[in-house]
Amino acid sequence: MEENGRKQKWIMWAWVLAVAVAAIFFASYRDSQQVEQLSYSEFLQQLEAKNINEVFIQQDVIRGELIKPAAEGRKRFIVTRVDGRIAELLAKHNVKFSGVTESSLLRDILGWVIPVVLFAGFWVFFSRRLSEQGGGGLGGGFMSFGKSN
């Protein structure tokens, strides 16, 4: 009987993990579909046309938002960073910009999974403690105040 309970718990944890991983990959896929990949020359053309609302500069790429959508109707874009004097150009054209620290997939996954695992672990721990103390045991416990002797 105990072996069956362990198997059910393992299956439950496998489902929780599968759902968490699927949610992370779905979110990253959805975000990648809404972003227009621009060449650096197209980026400079959009900058000269004053069609860039704001950018986020990372070490290797520039992500941003256009004022008017690109040809395919997407407002968000990503460009491989080439020019070292990009800050001067952006300031010259009155574009809001900021530097962004890149995140790794492992850090993102751990940021979602660890809190869920900790919460579930506390839940299991406290539910076991309450069931040991209160349910049908002889030692009294959580709900034993109304028992008849």
Image (cartoon, grey):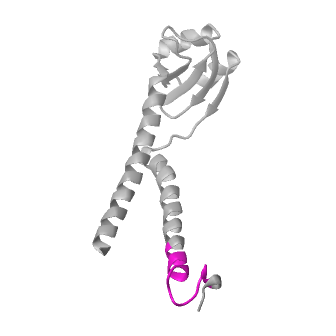
Residue 139 lies within the magenta run: yes
In the image, 140 versus 9, the foreground residue is 140
Q: Position of residue 49 (x, y in %)?
A: 62, 7
- Quadrant of the frame with the N terminus: bottom left
State left or right for residue 10 relative to residue 122: left
Image-quadrant location for residue 69: top right
Q: Position of residue 76 (x, y in %)?
A: 55, 21
When the figure is inspected, residue 125 is found, relative to residue 58, above or below; the finding is below
In the image, 132 versus 31, the foreground residue is 132
What residue do we see at 65% from left, 27% from top? Answer: 97
Please give the range of residues in magenta.
128-144
Q: How many marks?
A: 0
Q: Residue furthest front?
A: 148
In the image, 133 versus 87, the foreground residue is 133
In the image, 32 versus 58, the foreground residue is 32
What residue do we see at 55% from left, 41% from top? Answer: 101
Q: Position of residue 85 (x, y in %)?
A: 58, 23
